[in-house]
Amino acid sequence: MHIDPLERKWLYVASGVVALFLGAIFYTAFVHNIHPPGGMEVVDSASLHINPEFAEANLGVKSQADGSLRVTLVAARYGFYPRDIRVPAGTPITFRIASADVLHGVHVPMTNLSTMIVPGYISTVTTEFPKPGEYPMLCNEYCGMGHDHMWSRVTVVAREYWPEQQTGKGK
Amino acid sequence: MAVDKKKSGSSEEFSPVGTWALMCLVVTAMAAAWLFLYFGVFLPRGAIH
Amino acid sequence: MDNEVKKLALTHFWVSFGSFGLACVLGVYQVLERSGFIPAIQSPEVYFASVSTHGVLMAFVLTTFFVMGFGYVVAVSSLKTPLWSPKLAWTGFWISAVGVVLAAIPLLIGKASVLYTFYPPVQANLLFYIGAALLVVGSWFWAVIMIVMFAGWKNAHPGETVPLPMFATTANAVLWLWTSVGVALEVVFQLIPWALGLTDSIDPGLARTLFAWTLHPIVYFWLLPAYIALYSFVPRAAGGKLFSHGLARAAFVMLLVLALPIGFHHLYMDPEQGAGYKLSHAVGTFLVALPTLVTGFTVVASMEMAGRARGGAGLFGWIGALPWRNPVVLAAILAFLMLIAGGFGGIVNASYAMNAMVHNTAWVPGHFHLMFGGTTVMLYMAVAYHVWPKLTGRAFASADKPLIQLWSWFIGMVVLSSPWHILGLLGQPRRISSVTYNSLLTLAWDPYELVMIIGGFILLFSGLLFLHILGKAQRQGAPQKDDEIEYAEYRDAQPAVHPLLNGFAVWNVLIFGLMLANYGQPIAQFFLNQTFGSVAWGY
């Protein structure tokens, strides 16, 4: 097949740019552990109320033995429960979220906390909030007529003002 | 640059230098914008896995 | 071209463009409602019914009927053979048309507000699922006719090269058969039995995986006719020839093969699939950008050839020398501008973990309105302007109106989609009918909503002008005899191509392998592990 020399050069340039993007993605994925959430973990969404992890009494912000934080939430029409949480800035936080009804999505604007919440599966995502402030934690997947109103509040406090971490408050 | 080379098998002498320059401009701008979004916006919003 | 084919194509095009006009009206209502500036029209019930209908009309009806109608035109005019089995073609048309009507009834009365990606375990009226299935089944008739005509021509012309437009159209038919399997499995084995009450529950994880199978290649099913217009109409309209024929065929093959095994970029944020498969689909997603980059070069180089022949000098002088008043050329230039911006947005979406920044935000409709509403629909319009006089036997009355229409479509799309991208980076969700978050962050969103309303009205004007131009030409245009559809010549005299670029057998085997590697385990896991289904929910 005859290819014009300049077009051949263009093929190299185009491939090079694609390789640059993929290179950055692979580098940050395997060196800095930057990945999307995921990994199939099933849960019976119809019985979350008696599930040891997702029963009401066990939801909220918990300190882990290694100093990291875990936030367990139930997404249900129309909110993320508990609806008001406080977390520290600049700290890795693992969110574990299950849906009690339909599809939901969670996003905290201006941060990378984002995951789909699919009934029957547990969504696990670890991220950190860079800046203190009060953020809406909003549903970004159509879930019914009240979807617009599905949001909860996340208060990110500066690390030096984070006394709660010892007591497990903030649920 | 292969600007002046003649094309074998081609009936007319034509080298798409304008296209080459234009496409390189476009793809360079794209790469710069992508690198800015990835390292300047996305990653500073918090590591994720 | 015989009259039967003209009638067949025009009927398809009117269903396609009529749906498009209605969907444009809904679009304007949506930007108005969503802004919250007019409290009297606030209604999530009407809004979500409207969004569902807008999506189905634009993405399924406009596209499928256009692709079918254009495919028939390309087949008979590029192969110069009669249509194989007009009876089957009409059967396919009516099955699809009945499907559209069946789906439209529940959509319009708010009984199928599940948006165009179905959203189980939210359940729609049974008629919606049956209608959607029939629309797809009807389109399979078209795909089979294209493949039969392709194979028939090759048998009758051993050793000859199938003309590029028909090679690409057949690639699209093959692509569509592979593509539609995912959604067909979901509708037939999951949604319909569940809506009938034969099964109590549905696995939304499996449903989303099957839909992802379809959701990426379907956009290439819509896009390929636009690329056919770029390769086969634009060089000739500009006054030149197609710059490189071999690479054009290679690009279509790459689009066919690489568009399929990459659907998980729609599931990056989903819990039911793991990071490994997401990464492998990400690699494929980046690779499928290559044929588009090749297309950009080849078509722009074809235009450069034309511009230089018309006296354009210097590095970029040929751009000004192009015939900007030719609707096909103008549409191509404007489509390329939107393709650059939309393609960039798509690369951001595709970037694996970075998807978290934009997933389900307003960025995403911004992206696909540029790529689909912008690039693809703009080139559908170019095709319409090119073939309409030949199909109707009547010329356009005004040379200016099509230009005004194309420019306004471009301006409207830029005005509509730029704020969407910004809102997305600010975190606004894509599928909301109002902003109720009691947060200072969201106050910054208001000015962008205002700009979007302006964009919506410009697009409505342009869409209705498009229908007016076509309707007026067909009813009142001056009669014209020429009904020969001509395609761009190749720069080199018809070159022989490698057999791999003249058929699809080997590529089908490769696709099968890639699909098995990329979807085998991800689908099998739902049957190998215990999973929990969901009961049906209203909305």
Image (spheres, rainbow, N blue to C red):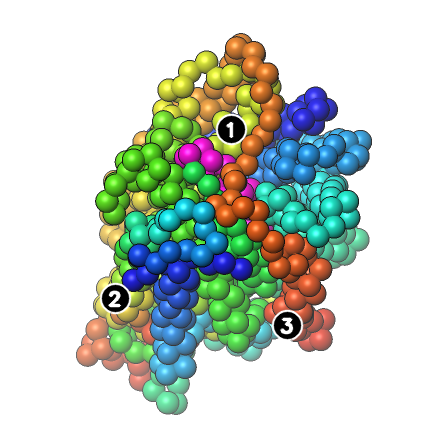
Which of label 3 and label 2 is nearer to you?
Answer: 3
Q: CA distance from mark 2 to mark 1?
A: 45 Å
Give the vertical position of A96 relative to C85 (above or below).
below
Around disc 2, counting alpha carbons within 10 Å, would you say few (fewer than 14), some (14 to 19), or many (20 or more)?
few
* Numbered disc 3: secondary structure: helix
Q: Which residue type does callout 1 highlight?
A: His
Nearest the viewer among C526 and C510 is: C510
Q: Which residue is mark 2?
A: B40
Q: Which residue is mark 1?
A: C386
Residue drawn at the location 46% of the way across and 64% of the way down: C286
| Residue A131 visible within the image | yes
Around disc 1, counting alpha carbons within 10 Å, would you say few (fewer than 14), some (14 to 19), or many (20 or more)?
some
* Chain of the residue under the numbered disc 1 shown in the image: C
Q: Is residue C473 left or right of residue C518?
A: left
Quarter of the rendering occupied by the C terminus of chain A: bottom left
* Numbered disc 1: secondary structure: helix
| Residue C432 visible within the image | no
Magenta stretch contains residue C388: no
Around disc 3, counting alpha carbons within 10 Å, would you say few (fewer than 14), some (14 to 19), or many (20 or more)?
some
Q: Main secondary structure of the magenta part?
A: helix
